[in-house]
Amino acid sequence: MGSQCSCTCTDLAIRCRRQPMSSLEPATSKPQFSHGLEKSSVVRFLYRADACGHHIPIPRPSRGGTFFAPTEMHVDVAHIAVACHECGRVTLYSPHNVLRLHSDSPCPYQVGRLVLVYIEAEGVHSDCEPHTTIRVLWDDATKRLVCGKPVSAWEIDPDVKCVHGRPLKSPLPDIQLYYLADMPF
């Protein structure tokens, strides 16, 4: 990821504000069928039981293919750092952490409600270039991060490091620039 913004958003530097995501919870019942057509949709989530345990909604991969069809997928990263929209914990996720669940609500990325963005986090030393990217959810209607905590209160897992293997500067500043992110898997 480069450091130049690829979006046309004019609200690039804003404070993180709490935005509930209760409508994105996976459906608890089986999908309902009407005349052979499924009424629920499939939503992709990141999930790690050993992390915060929340389901983080994610868009479809940016470069075609899916985790279930790996021959069509060109993944150039093994792990990505993602901030949880519920608790602000930043954890590394891999293609093995992708779940597909039936939901009573449509995929928020397909209906234009959410956008995946990233921030750049610095390492503890000045030579940590390029900066580490942390993906996070963006509410396209309100032009705000979707997160239960301000950026400065995010908890960064120790396995999220700069390119030199060192920890990231913590706390992260609340004022950040946000860039459109891809979903590599």
Image (spheres, rainbow, N blue to C red):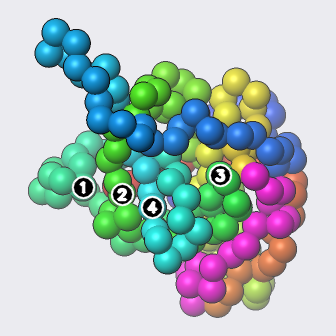
Q: Residue at x 71, y 68 (%)?
A: 121
The circle drawn on residue 67 is: 1
Q: Residues within 10 Å of mark 4 (few under 14, many from 20)?
A: many
Give the image location of residue 168, x and y in percent: 71, 80
For marks 1 and 3, the one nearer the N-term is 1
For residue 135, above or below residue 90: above
- Foreground mark, 1 or 4, reads 4
- Report the residue marked by disc 3: 85
For marks 2 and 1, the one nearer the N-term is 1
Q: Are marks 1 and 4 in contact (CB under 8 Å)?
A: no
The part of the chain drawn in magenta is 148-165
Give the image location of residue 28, x and y in percent: 41, 41
**Res 165 quadrant in image:** bottom right
Report the amino acid beneath label 4. Tyr
- Report the residue marked by disc 2: 98
Q: Measure how far apart labels 4 and 2 are at the Cα level.
A: 6 Å
For marks 2 and 3, the one nearer the N-term is 3
Give the image location of residue 48, x and y in percent: 46, 68
- Foreground mark, 2 or 1, reads 2
Q: Are marks 4 and 2 in contact (CB under 8 Å)?
A: no
Q: Are marks 2 and 1 in contact (CB under 8 Å)?
A: yes
Q: Measure how far apart labels 1 and 4 are at the Cα level.
A: 14 Å
Report the amino acid beneath label 1. Phe
Q: For this view, does 2 lie left or right of residue 104?
A: right
**Res 138 quadrant in image:** top right
Image mark count: 4
Q: Residue at x 58, y 33 (%)?
A: 23
Q: Secondary structure at mark 1?
A: loop
- Report the residue marked by disc 4: 47
For marks 1 and 4, the one nearer the N-term is 4
For residue 172, above or below residue 180: below
